[in-house]
Image: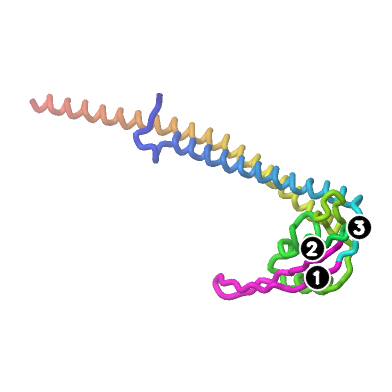
């Protein structure tokens, strides 16, 4: 079995470490890609089903802009739309801030965009009446925008981009393995050459010693 006295300089050890790190990264990307695809199609399925849900009138109860002061190489401000609505089902009042199935609220969807925040606050003023789709089995499960939008496209694109990167990583694993093997062979040849040179030097010294005697 071939071993290296110094594993930090051993091509085989370096190649194995690269393979392990690449495999871990590839698996992480694969899991992330599957999760992105799952959430995308899950949202599409829910949108398809919610169009069959009953509709009730909802009323905007909160519509404002949250400003947060941040510090990163200087002071700056982030603006988030805070919009929520109330509705009544079977004489029971509910409150929600979810407008679509992609995000839990508008604050999560529109991050750090003052113009978007101002637009949404104007679009949903307080006391504005809006149609609300609600799940008849779970009245607290609602949505306002029952449209597919463009978010599902980004989810699918992310999935395919991750898969392309995974294929590239797998290719690099194979390439790094071949290069590591080649480096190991060269290192072995170099080691044998050094041993042969040392042996020749010893023989030369012995010959010189005998000639002197």
Residue 197: quarter of image: top left
164 versus 119 height, above or below: above
The image position of residue 124, as x and y in percent, is: 83, 70
**Image quadrant in which the C terminus is located:** top left
The residues bearing labels 2 and 1 have C-alpha atoms spaced at a distance of 9 Å
Residue in the image at 9% along x and 28% along y: 212
Point out the residue furthest to the left here: 213
**Crowd class of label 3 (few under 14; some 14 to 19; many from 20; radius 10 Å):** some
Which numbered circle lies on residue 55? 3
Which residue is drawn at the image coordinates 43% and 32% (left, top)? 186
Q: Quadrant of the N terminus?
A: top left
- Does the residue at mark 2 contact the one at mark 1 (Cβ under 8 Å)? yes
- For the record, the magenta segment spans 59-88
User: Which residue is at the front of the view, 165 or 185?
Assistant: 165
Name the secondary structure under disc 1. Answer: strand
Label 1 near label 3: C-beta < 8 Å? no
Q: Which mark is residue 95?
A: 2
User: Badge 1 is on which residue?
Assistant: 61
Residue 91, x across and y down, in percent: 88, 60
Please, what is the dominant secondary structure of the magenta stretch? strand
Residue 48 tag number: none
Magenta stretch holds residue 150: no
- Residue 50 in percent (x, y) is at 87, 51
């Amino acid at each position: 079995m071939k071993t290296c006295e110094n594993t930090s300089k051993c091509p085989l050890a370096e190649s194995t470490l690269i393979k392990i790190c690449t495999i871990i990264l590839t698996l992480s990307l694969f899991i992330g890609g599957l999760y992105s695809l799952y959430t995308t199609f899950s949202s599409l399925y829910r949108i398809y089903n919610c169009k069959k849900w009953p509709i009730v009138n909802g009323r905007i109860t909160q519509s404002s802009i949250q400003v947060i002061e941040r510090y990163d190489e200087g002071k700056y401000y982030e603006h988030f739309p805070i919009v929520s609505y109330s509705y009544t089902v079977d004489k029971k009042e509910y409150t929600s801030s979810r407008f679509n199935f992609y995000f839990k609220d508008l604050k999560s969807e529109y991050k750090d965009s003052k113009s978007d925040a101002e637009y949404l606050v104007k679009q949903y003023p307080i006391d504005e009446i809006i149609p609300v789709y609600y799940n008849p089995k779970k009245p607290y499960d609602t949505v306002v925008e029952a449209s597919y939008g463009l978010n599902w496209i980004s989810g699918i694109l992310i999935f395919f981009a991750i898969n392309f990167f995974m294929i590239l990583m797998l290719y690099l694993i194979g390439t790094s393995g071949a290069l590591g093997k080649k480096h190991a062979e060269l290192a072995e040849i170099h080691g044998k050459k050094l041993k042969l040179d040392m042996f020749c030097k010893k023989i030369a010294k012995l010959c010189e010693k005998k000639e002197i005697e």
